[in-house]
């Protein structure tokens, strides 16, 4: 413990001399600590006056007693004795009041000033006129402007902020994350540069991340204000305001909406049929566009098996597109195309230059579709299995027998022995071997009787769909379906279907009581109404209206919910059949392995023959269903397995998950621990993707990577032990985040509202000096008081007391006062 120094704290010279004389030491005190006197036993309130009164009374009594002493004692000695006795009295009073010294150490806790900078893709926009002069011929992008603001040349801004607190930096796009600042003893803090490559903007996440900082004083948002996430940014701003943390948005970009007219997307079915029309929908985005029409053209580009262009693209259609009312929104152009030569094709739509083009038009573009595989009109081999001769079976048998593109074999399980089965290719027994079943492209199960099936046949059907890319349709019925899906021999069939059935124990009973006296209309799921099975007309809305006008459903099978990868096309309209998972699915499409599957949870499609002319909608639905199911067989090499992605479309930065089931040349599961695949992107670049075997699952592989290239990408796996053409592949589309790229102007009103709700203020990028001055300095000063240091419990105090008493005793003895 250091002694009290001559310059300690804020004590006066006589206090320092007294403390040094008493031998007091600065226990636990910093050199710049402040010292304070403290009477630890001093009573409070009226007790202070009582102590003073008692002390005064005692001193008066001492003086009175010495006045009565014998006259032989000189008066000056009496005065001295009174002083000595009063000194003892005062000293005892001081000891009883317990004087102490407290050392107060002060330290500062700086607040945190959060600098949040937008790192989303919209920050890569180069505006026509930013609030910053530039001598370059082309304007800088927004991210370049922000990086320039925080460059070493403008270090004074950061130094000014650092005088008011410590700095923390956040980069945010669809998510927000802290970034480290670099700083040396001789330089100001440096922020890492922005790249503006992430998709989406979540301002709420940036604010919430800023509020998590240690003692936040303010959040500085450098952004264009385009909030594309679902989180409530205004709620986050209110929370900041309630905590007294102002938000200071700094707007980056041009607030005027640019005039944009561009082809956003081109939709075409992945597969079409030779000499049959198919639709191509072109979506055009308009933003602040002039009223009027504009020509649009459609080009067709032949492709090889590697999706590489072959020959020249040719113009195949033209149309006119009209800007929506107000100049902003979307318009859709419907093209119809028929191709006579089978093969792979790419369709590219382009807007031609308008006759009068505004000088500030930002973009007139063209966009390509996914590759379209046009299949030849060879016969589709269909195996139709029915438990009984229902009206659906009878009319389907007639329809497929009449259709020249379908080669039908029927197996009516209730047919009497000795009678021939129907179809163009009659059979004498249910296919039981791989060779017999794999000769077909599609299997249709119409409420089949489970008595004729066993577990081995269900496993064979699973291989037919999952490995052989065969199509499977299951139409549930009231006679056999409950038993089929609950019988241990055949219950595995449920795993192939795109729906789940919930409690299988009660399934058969529930299915028997699912009939009603009321015909409920099919309720189409609008988001999936453009599915090829449902498309009666090129216009989706017209197709929906036609479906709603078809005869309704009396009986339905109690499916619970779709599997995660399935698409529900139609639901039951009866609200009483709604479960915790949602409405009862009636029509669902999905995939099992490499094959397409369809589930029909109702009967009575034969009633649709009364709609339209010559049963056109009944015929169209079932032909489209068969063709959808056979599309999985377009690539013969898929018979040795499949590779698929978890989605068909991704945005830049999304995680792509691959799963594959691969076989060798003998159709046995591959046993290699790893398989290399090739990823071909739209810019003809290639990348190696390594598929890793899943433990304890022979032939199954998985991989994951990040979608980083825009456009159509194809993943190809070369199968070992086969020819150079023996490969399997899958394709997927990578797109820009829609809102992030279509709304790129500075959203100044949103940023101003955020500032107002939080108690902050909006700034432009040329107001950095005002911004630094507006940031509050909320550095906290904390006082830490030491334990009281007693001043009476020191040797000097005892020596003084003994000295006073001894001196008084000696004087009294000298003058005979004892």
Image: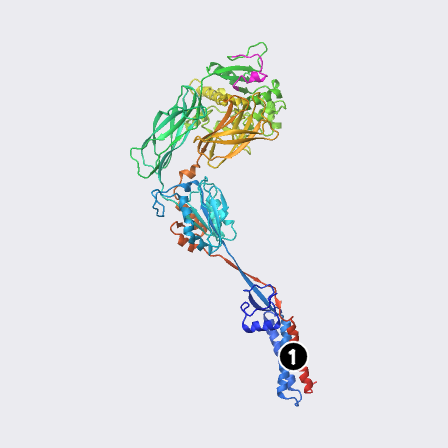
Q: Is residue 333 left or right of residue 458?
A: left
Q: Is residue 432 on the magenta stretch?
A: yes
Quadrant including the C terminus: bottom right
Residue most extreme to the front: 186
Picture quadrant of residue 362: top left
Q: Where is residue 724 in the image (x, y as percent from the top left)?
A: 50, 22
Q: Is residue 766 on the magenta stretch?
A: no
Q: Is residue 135 left or right of residue 691?
A: left
Colour scheme employed for the rendering of this structure: rainbow
Q: In this view, does 33 lie to the left or right of 132?
A: right
Query: Observer-nearest residue: 189 or 115?
Result: 189
Examine the rendering and report whether any part of residue 190 can be seen.
yes
Q: In this view, does 287 lie to the left or right of 423?
A: left
Kindly identify which residue carries mark 1.
804
**What range of the chain is rendered magenta?**
425-442
Query: Observer-nearest residue: 127 or 495?
Result: 127
Picture quadrant of residue 365: top left
Residue most extreme to the bottom: 72
Q: In this rendering, is residue 647 above or below 408? A: below
Q: Where is residue 330 in the image (x, y as percent from the top left)?
A: 38, 34
């Amino acid at each position: 413990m250091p002694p009290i120094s001559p310059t300690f704290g804020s004590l006066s010279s006589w206090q320092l001399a007294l403390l040094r004389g008493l031998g007091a030491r600065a226990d636990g005190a910093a050199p710049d600590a402040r010292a304070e006197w403290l009477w630890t036993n001093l009573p409070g309130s009226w007790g202070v006056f009582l102590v003073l009164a008692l002390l005064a009374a005692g001193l008066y009594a001492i003086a009175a007693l010495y006045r009565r002493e014998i006259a032989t004692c000189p008066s000056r000695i009496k005065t001295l004795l009174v002083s000595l006795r009063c000194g003892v009295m005062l000293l005892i009073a001081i000891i009883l009041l317990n004087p102490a010294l407290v050392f107060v150490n002060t330290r500062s806790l700086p607040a945190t000033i959060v600098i949040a900078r937008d790192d989303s893709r919209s920050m890569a926009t180069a505006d026509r006129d930013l609030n910053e002069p530039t001598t370059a011929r082309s304007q800088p992008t927004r991210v370049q402007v922000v990086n320039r603001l925080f460059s070493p040349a403008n270090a004074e801004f950061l130094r000014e902020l650092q005088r008011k607190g410590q700095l923390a930096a956040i980069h945010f796009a669809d998510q927000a994350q802290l970034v480290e600042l670099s700083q040396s003893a001789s330089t100001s803090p440096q922020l890492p540069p922005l790249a503006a490559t992430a998709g989406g903007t979540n301002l709420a996440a940036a604010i919430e991340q800023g509020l998590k900082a240690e003692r936040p004083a303010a959040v500085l948002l450098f952004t264009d204000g385009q909030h594309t996430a679902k989180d409530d940014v205004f709620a986050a701003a209110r929370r900041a305001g309630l905590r007294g943390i102002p938000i200071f948005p700094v707007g980056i970009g041009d607030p005027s909406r640019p005039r944009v007219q561009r082809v956003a997307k081109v939709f075409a079915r992945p597969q079409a049929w030779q000499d049959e029309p198919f639709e191509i929908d072109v979506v055009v985005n308009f933003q602040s566009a002039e009223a009027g029409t504009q020509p649009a053209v459609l080009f067709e580009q032949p492709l090889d098996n590697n999706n590489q262009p072959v020959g020249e693209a040719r113009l195949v259609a033209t149309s006119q597109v009209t800007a929506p009312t107000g100049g902003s929104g979307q318009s859709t152009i419907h093209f119809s195309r028929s191709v006579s030569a089978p093969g792979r094709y790419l369709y590219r739509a382009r807007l031609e230059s308008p006759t009068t083009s505004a000088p500030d038009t930002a973009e007139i573009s063209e966009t390509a579709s996914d590759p379209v595989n046009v299949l030849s009109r060879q016969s589709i081999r269909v195996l139709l299995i029915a438990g009984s001769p229902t009206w659906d079976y009878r009319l389907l048998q007639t329809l497929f027998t009449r259709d020249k593109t379908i080669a039908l074999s029927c197996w009516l399980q209730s047919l009497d022995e000795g009678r021939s089965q129907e179809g163009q290719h009659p059979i004498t027994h249910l296919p039981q071997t791989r060779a017999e079943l794999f000769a077909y492209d599609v299997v249709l199960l119409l409420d089949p009787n489970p008595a004729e099936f066993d577990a081995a046949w269900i496993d064979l059907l699973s291989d037919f769909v999952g490995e052989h890319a065969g199509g499977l349709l299951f139409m549930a019925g009231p006679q056999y379906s409950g038993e089929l899906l609950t019988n241990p021999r055949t219950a595995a069939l449920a795993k192939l279907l795109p729906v789940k059935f919930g409690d299988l124990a009660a399934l058969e009973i529930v299915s028997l009581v699912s009939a009603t006296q009321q015909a409920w209309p099919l309720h189409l799921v609008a988001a999936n109404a453009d599915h090829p099975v449902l498309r009666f007309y090129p216009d989706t809305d017209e197709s929906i209206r036609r479906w709603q006008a078809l005869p309704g459903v009396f009986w339905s099978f109690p499916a619970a919910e779709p599997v995660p990868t399935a698409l529900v096309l139609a639901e039951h309209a009866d609200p009483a059949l709604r479960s915790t998972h949602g409405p009862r699915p009636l029509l669902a499409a999905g995939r099992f392995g490499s094959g397409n599957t369809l589930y029909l949870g109702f009967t009575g499609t034969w009633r649709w023959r009364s709609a339209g002319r010559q049963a056109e909608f009944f015929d169209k639905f079932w032909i489209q269903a068969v063709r959808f199911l056979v599309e999985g067989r377009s690539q013969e090499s898929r018979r040795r397995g499949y590779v698929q992605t978890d989605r068909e479309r991704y945005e830049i930065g999304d995680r792509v998950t691959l799963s594959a089931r691969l076989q060798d040349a003998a159709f046995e599961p591959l046993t290699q621990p790893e398989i290399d695949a090739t990823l071909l992107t739209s810019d003809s670049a290639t990348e190696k993707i390594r598929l890793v075997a899943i433990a304890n699952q022979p032939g199954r592989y998985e991989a994951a990577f990040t979608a980083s290239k825009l456009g159509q990408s194809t993943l190809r796996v070369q199968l070992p032990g086969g020819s150079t053409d023996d490969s399997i592949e899958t394709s997927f589309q990578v797109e820009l985040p829609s809102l992030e790229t279509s709304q790129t102007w500075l959203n100044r009103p949103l940023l101003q509202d955020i500032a107002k709700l939080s108690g902050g203020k909006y700034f432009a990028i040329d107001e950095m000096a005002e911004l630094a001055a507006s940031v509050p300095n909320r550095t906290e000063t904390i006082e830490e008081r030491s334990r009281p240091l007693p001043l009476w419990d020191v040797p000097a105090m005892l020596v003084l007391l003994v000295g006073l008493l001894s001196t008084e005793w000696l004087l009294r003895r000298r003058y005979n006062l004892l």
